[in-house]
Image (cartoon, grey):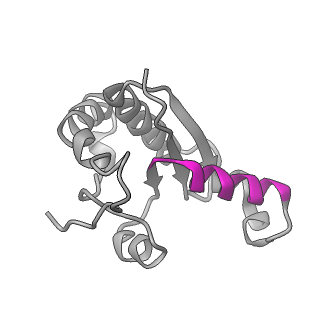
Amino acid sequence: MSDLVVASVVGNPRPGSRTHAIGRTLAGAISAELGTEPGPEIDLAALGARTLDPADAGAISAVEEVLEADVLVVASPTYHFTPLLLELGAAVPVRGLFVVEAELEQFPATARAWAHRHAAELVPAFGTSRPLEASNQ
């Protein structure tokens, strides 16, 4: 079993949303492919406005969990997160996985296939001092 941490952050304003389920499913598929257990799930809807309070214990804990993750699944009902993640200092080694409503039923199989194809790209720099680099492939 690997000690890599695969966490997810969900940015849907509704708690327990389909977006949350997609993030959980993809994080689980990536974790399985990497031989580890799924890590923390941060649902920003549950934090609400506390997300913006730098003194809030829940927000602080969520930030710590994100910073400790080796792989982070960012799930949101909107697109175009790569520029934001790069600006925040994240490495984005693979393109995002976009899901439309008609694909929800078969998404678990899609997530497993995506994780199988991309897992090696998500972790090539672990154990080295070289940071992952962004890719637009």
Residue 24 placed where, x, y %? 48, 37
Left or right: 38 in relation to 83: right
Q: Residue 121 or 11: which is nearer the viewer?
A: 121
Start-end of magenta stretch: 57-71
Residue 84 placed where, x, y %? 43, 75
Up/down of 5 relative to 100, above or below: above
Left or right: 43 in relation to 36: right
Left or right: 20 in relation to 54: left
In reply to whether residue 70 is colored magenta, the answer given is yes
Q: Residue 48 or 116: which is nearer the viewer?
A: 116
What residue appears at the point 74 percent right and 72 percent down from the top-left corner? Answer: 52
What residue appears at the point 33 percent right and 61 percent down from the top-left corner? Answer: 130
In reply to whether residue 55 is colored magenta, the answer given is no
Left or right: 48 in relation to 131: right
Q: Quadrant of residue 86?
A: bottom left
**Rendered-image quadrant of the N terminus:** top left
The prevailing secondary structure element of the residues shown in magenta is helix
**Rendered-image quadrant of the C terminus:** bottom left
Up/down of 34 relative to 130, above or below: above
Residue farthest top in this picture? 1
What residue appears at the point 31 percent right and 51 percent down from the top-left corner? Answer: 125
Residue 51 placed where, x, y %? 73, 65
Up/down of 87 relative to 30, above or below: below
What residue appears at the point 65 percent right and 47 percent down from the top-left corner? Answer: 15
